[in-house]
Image (cartoon, coloured by chain):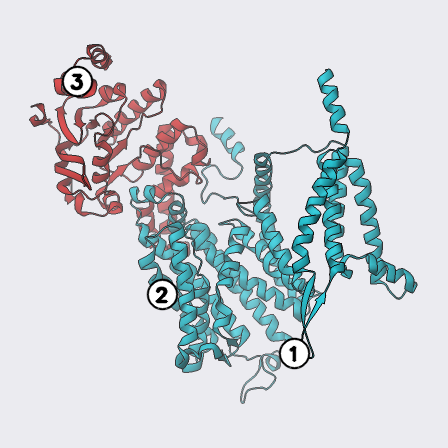
Amino acid sequence: MADLSINAEKARALDMGALLKDAGLTAFVAFALSISLVGFQIKDASGGLQLITRFGDVAVVTAIAFIGRVLLFLLRRGRGRAVLISSAVLAAVLLLSILASMTPDSLPQAIVATARAVLPFGNVVLSSVMLIVLVVLAVRGYQVMTHSVHEMTMEERDREMDKVAARVQKISLFLGPLALVFAIALPFMPFADRRIVDIGTLVLTYVMLGWGLNIVVGLAGLLDLGYVAFYAVGAYSYALLAQYFDASFWLALPFAGIMAAAAGVTLGFPVLRLRGDYLAIVTLGFGEMIRIILLNWYQFTGGPDGLSGIPRPSFFGLPFTRRVPEGGDSFATFFGLDYSSLHRVVFLYYLILALAMITNLFTLRIRKLPIGRAWEALREDEIACRSLGINPTNTKLTAFGIGAMFGGFAGSFFATRQGFISPESFTFIESAVILAIVVLGGMGSQLGVVFASILLIGLPEIFRDLQQYRMLAFGAAMVLIMIWRPAGLLAHREPSIRLWGRDKIGKKAEVHS
Amino acid sequence: MSGAQEYRSANRPLLTVEHLTMRFGGLVAVDDVSFTAFDREITAIIGPNGAGKTTVFNCLTGFYKPTVGRITLHREDGEMYLEQMEGFRIAAKGGVARTFQNIRLFPHMTVLENLMIAQHNPLMRASGFTVLGLFGFSSYKIAEKAAVDRARYWLEKIGLLEKADDEAGSLPYGDQRRLEIARAMCIDPVVLCLDEPAAGLNPRESADLNDLLKFIRDEHNIGVLLIEHDMSVVMGISDHIVVLDYGKKISDGTPEFVRNDPTVIRAYLGEEDEEETAAMTGGEG
């Protein structure tokens, strides 16, 4: 008993030295990192480059790191009330400042100026993010105060997250269609302007690429670091067909898919006997090879100049042009609409939505077919597959080929949307982003790919105002997900076939009765 | 020398192994081994650790290409030379199924899915190599239902029917062993090769395993090849035992014959150890 009370006494007494040391160290690291990254900026001014110092921002970063660490330290030591009060006060100040700086007209000049000065970096969006962090801290402080949380081990937390993922998977029966309805309705939403629809199109392109790569990486378990090569093959197939044979988009689309699939099989044949890291390296090399061929084959592909004037898709033969073709109709005149450049943007949006949905339905269906199951089995254990009479080479090749085909479709869509392509668009970073989408979403999870695409592509586009900070946030988000959910956001596998159905317990009771 | 003695049976020969030799560099893992496994019999391959038993299995099932030798599978529709065939074809065309010493299930897939994957090839044909299945043709649905029925049959046999939708990796060890055997049976084999199926099982589970193997031999009329250390399993159910030591066959015959073969006793227990010899021969029950 005596020991316990002493321990409790110790726990109550806050070790100020440790607190200052911990927070000071964190602040020092923040200072050391930010002095070079944030403190200096080189600007292109008239008369040469100019060095700008931003030591004020460095001080802000250091202060934020210090305060944040103090709050975390207090939280760990069970000082819930202190954390709650201080973060609530900080949050309130921040909230008032944000509100004040957003309504400069209705308030006295002095107040607005003070409010702006209070905002870290003078940036409303960043301040809002910090506000959210403070609110989260306050909530945690309240939970610690009322003892409604206990420290979870990593395993407990993983299990907890798995439950969440399983639940999400269960509601994805509704969530999926709901997301689809939202996606269909998006262009007609009141807030949807051209920019939003464009971002939607971009996100959907990556969703489609993610779903295509998911077949290779998520289902068949073949780590492909050169997926962008098939995207490039698809794009160039269409662009070159259009340039040399005047092929229309609809005619070229299946051909682009076939070309990409052929590239996939050609690459796959020699390299699929490799496994894991070795396969990843070879596919990475292949991706670069395709790009460098495109870059250097000047006579055929236009090299670094790229290919321009790629024809736009038509709506069942009706072009989206202001000028009505002779003896025919354009989309606008046929439907009796006023010409608007938005028509084509919306049409492209629906086009990629349809292509992505085809990819999705295909994947969902093929998972329940023997080939899909064989892919997953191959990912689990190749030797066992061989002992069961499954031809591993053919099975992997089909996965590679089909994954590549959808990459090719997405590529020809990319070409027709941009109207101009060059090898610049098909660098390794694209492969990395697509792979990141698949891995972050949770390998094999269709809905996970959508989430991850919105997270990795949509949000950085929306937060374009933050300039380079968004890349910082991108990195931070990746690190956080890898810490909290290393298997991916929605890594929960739904069986491809069930004997007892979803409502398992009820069925079992039936069997027994 | 007792190695010259060959086991004879009234049944049809199923698998003939002639002069099988497997070298890994300078190491001779299997040295000129010949034996015949007969249809509707349980043939056990036993021997001390490192005797080359699993290597023989790996040659039979195409995981290794033998350095020398001929392995003939006598199917009712003709003969096949397994040493010339690729591993997956031996299973797909020859009907040689196997299990592994360290269980190789698909751990993150369900029990039922494991059994469905074993029926990959017939299902693949029924789904028109995916094309027909993709458009939902009824031929595939019928075939899939038949496959589920076959899986259900085996799940009932091994007592895992209720766990059909559980992840295979979450099953207890004994269940995983039985599931692997059921999965091998789902490819509709003519020979079933089991690599230490009783390893890690308790006596009760071992007894169940004996019953299952006898059931497979008698009701499904196939040959079973077995590597096993557990003498209660080996002596209890085998019709025919092949003994290997240092890659060579040292004995070949009925359990009675092998049990009393002095060469085997010497190989297993050393020259002098009378006590353990008694333990081994006493295992007949």
Q: Is residue A107 visible?
A: no
- Badge 2 crowding class, 10 Å Cα cut-off, few under 14, some 14 to 19, many 20 or more, is some
User: Which amino acid type corresponds to the residue marked 3 in the rendered image?
Assistant: Ile
Image coordinates for residue B19, horizontal then vertical, percent: 11, 37
Q: Is residue B17 visible?
A: yes
For mark 1, what is the residue? A340
Tag 3 and tag 2 share a subunit: no
For mark 2, what is the residue? A262
For mark 3, what is the residue? B265
Q: Colour of chain A?
A: cyan
Q: Secondary structure at mark 3?
A: helix
- Which chain, by letter, is red? B
Report whether B98 appears left or right of A205.
left
Give the spatial CA distance, label 2 vs label 1.
Answer: 39 Å
Image height of A387 relative to A469, above or below: above
Where on the picture, by quarter, is residue A405?
bottom left
Where on the picture, by quarter, is residue A282?
bottom left
Image height of B52 relative to A442, above or below: above
Chain at numbered mark 3: B
State the residue at coordinates (72%, 43%).
A23
Tag 2 and tag 1 share a subunit: yes
Chain at numbered mark 2: A
Q: Residue furthest bottom?
A: A326
Q: Quadrant of the N terminus of chain A?
A: top right
Q: Nearer the viewer, residue A379 or A167?
A: A379
Q: Secondary structure at mark 2?
A: helix
